[in-house]
Amino acid sequence: MRFVSFEVQGKASYGLWKDENNWLQVPDSLAAQYPDLKSVIAADQLDALEAAVLQSGVPVKSSEARLLPVIANPGKVFCVGLNYKTHVAEMKRADSEHPAIFTRFADSLSAHGAPLPKPAATQRFDFEGELAVIIGQGGRHISQEKAWDHIAGYACFNDGTARDWQRHTHQWTPGKNFPATGPLGPFMASRKAIPDVNQLTLESRLNGQVMQHASVADLIFTLPVIIEYLSGFTNLSPGDVIATGTPGGVGDKREPPVYMNAGDVIEVEISGLGILRNVVVNAGI
């Protein structure tokens, strides 16, 4: 099933995604017990949510509401860098023994359909289409063999990056955390709805032109390896988001470079996970 977070009549809510224009809102009785999608995940009640919403959910049209990042309030947002051979090659980096990890702040996330603000401080605003993993059951020292049991679901992610700020030093944090530059959505597909994540195909398109195309099976560090590594140094919690890396084809390494500018339409499509679409606008600051 496909789960979605949105705001309706000024109030944050959640429910099920039917299609681009139609959603089902969680009934009040369940919302009183679980105020957001993250709390449903933490209680391991996604199946109960699905049943309740299908039985008595309130229809909501996209014209009446606005989407939120599918996990609107993650405790942690991890990103894996250099996790496809094609991207490692274009960045001219050596292979690594361990995953390259950086973090995003929760307020750097945005939603499907929301304006994607190009920071005024950069002229090198780049796209990075990625598969995002949402943690279900948390924990420390999670083994690769048990890692799948700790995944709630998957979503599309665009790691919008100010390349110059990313490279001010060898620390990437500034270039990855301008407000609302990381769209996440449009929905979360549950793990049981995606029986084999390695069968998924990722594609990024800028104004309709294919820029990135890869199979998730091409990940250097697989999802179990990433989860084992992250849980080796910190506690993973329900609703935490892991962006698993981008394939080759980023704009910064093209000849000539291709960056996102106001009016551009950027789409990240992953089979089974929908199309994450945003229109770039100039940020005020």
Image (spheres, helix red, strand yellow):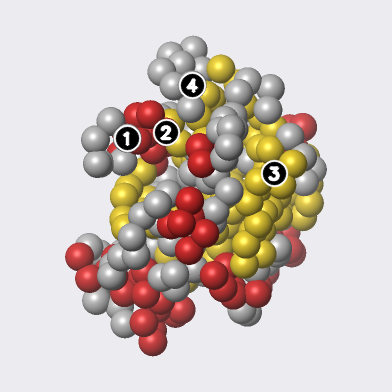
- The percent coordinates of residue 271 (x first, y second) are 70, 63
Disc 1 to disc 3, C-alpha distance: 25 Å
Q: Are marks 2 and 1 in contact (CB under 8 Å)?
A: yes
**In the displayed image of the protein, which residue is found farthest to the front?**
255
Specify whether 44 is left or right of 195.
left
The quarter of the displayed image where residue 208 is located:
top right
Q: Which residue is mark 1?
A: 167
- The percent coordinates of residue 114 (x first, y second) are 62, 32
The residue under label 4 is which amino acid type? Gln
Specify whether 79 is left or right of 124.
left
Disc 3 to disc 4, C-alpha distance: 19 Å
Q: Which residue is mark 3?
A: 205
User: 58 and 266: which one is in front?
Assistant: 266
**Between disc 1 and disc 3, whose residue precedes?**
1
**Between disc 4 and disc 2, whose residue precedes?**
4
Asked whether residue 14 is in view, the answer is no
**What crowding class fits label 1: few (fewer than 14 Cα within 10 Å), some (14-19), or many (20 or more)?**
few
Tell me the quadrant of the picture where the C terminus can be found: top left
Q: Which residue is mark 4?
A: 123
Q: Which mark is residue 163?
A: 2
**What crowding class fits label 2: few (fewer than 14 Cα within 10 Å), some (14-19), or many (20 or more)?**
many
Disc 3 to disc 2, C-alpha distance: 19 Å
Decide: is 61 above or below 220. Answer: above
**What crowding class fits label 3: few (fewer than 14 Cα within 10 Å), some (14-19), or many (20 or more)?**
some
